[in-house]
């Protein structure tokens, strides 16, 4: 167990990121999950930028529509679904390693995903409205 890299933990000691929690796993599972995250890093970085500029620290010089550009809704939805699947698989692996029921955890995440899916649709509709000047 490497307990994560302190540089990756962030400034808040009360917040534990998935990469930090992965550090508590056995070495083989830790490597596998880190490899899965690394493989999605370009996509994750893209959406972390959106989150940062749209929600966390709103960049008033660009609208959300400007940040997303002319991407097709199906592409954005597919990318967001890939991120959700990565997070779901990672959380289920952590739950399993903690002795929790991995299947029940996956079901609970799926229930929550339905709500998130509706939120994604609302966000995409709002972006569409901005592009059309509504």
Image (cartoon, rainbow, N blue to C red):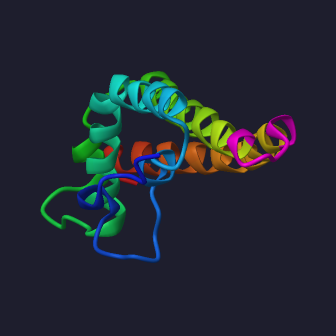
- Measured as percent of width and height from the top left, residue 14 is found at 46, 77
Left or right relative to 114: residue 104: right
Is residue 100 highlighted in magenta? Answer: yes
Magenta-tinted stretch: 96-104
The residue that appears at 50% across and 52% down in the rendered structure is: 21
**Pick the front one: 117 or 102:** 102
- Measured as percent of width and height from the top left, residue 35 is found at 39, 25
Q: Is residue 87 above or below residue 36?
A: below
Left or right relative to 74: residue 7: left
- Measured as percent of width and height from the top left, residue 115 is found at 72, 50
Q: Is residue 108 above or below residue 12?
A: above
The residue that appears at 69% across and 41% down in the rendered structure is: 97
The residue that appears at 79% across and 46% down in the rendered structure is: 99
**Pick the front one: 112 or 88:** 88
Is residue 51 highlighted in magenta? Answer: no
Q: Quadrant of residue 70?
A: top left
The residue that appears at 45% across and 57% down in the rendered structure is: 17
- Measured as percent of width and height from the top left, residue 45 is found at 27, 40
Q: Quadrant of residue 58?
A: bottom left
């Amino acid at each position: 167990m490497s307990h994560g890299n302190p540089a990756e933990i962030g400034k808040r000691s009360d917040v534990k990121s998935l990469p930090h929690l992965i550090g508590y796993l056995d070495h083989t599972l830790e490597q596998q999950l880190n490899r899965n995250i690394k493989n999605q890093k370009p996509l994750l970085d893209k959406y972390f930028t959106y989150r940062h500029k749209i929600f966390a620290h709103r960049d008033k010089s660009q609208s959300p529509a400007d940040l997303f550009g002319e991407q097709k809704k199906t592409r954005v939805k597919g990318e967001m679904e890939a991120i959700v699947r990565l997070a779901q698989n990672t959380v289920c692996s952590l739950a399993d390693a903690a002795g929790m029921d991995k299947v029940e955890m996956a079901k609970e995440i799926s229930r929550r995903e339905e709500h998130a899916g509706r939120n994604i649709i609302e966000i995409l509709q709002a972006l569409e409205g901005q592009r059309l000047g509504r």
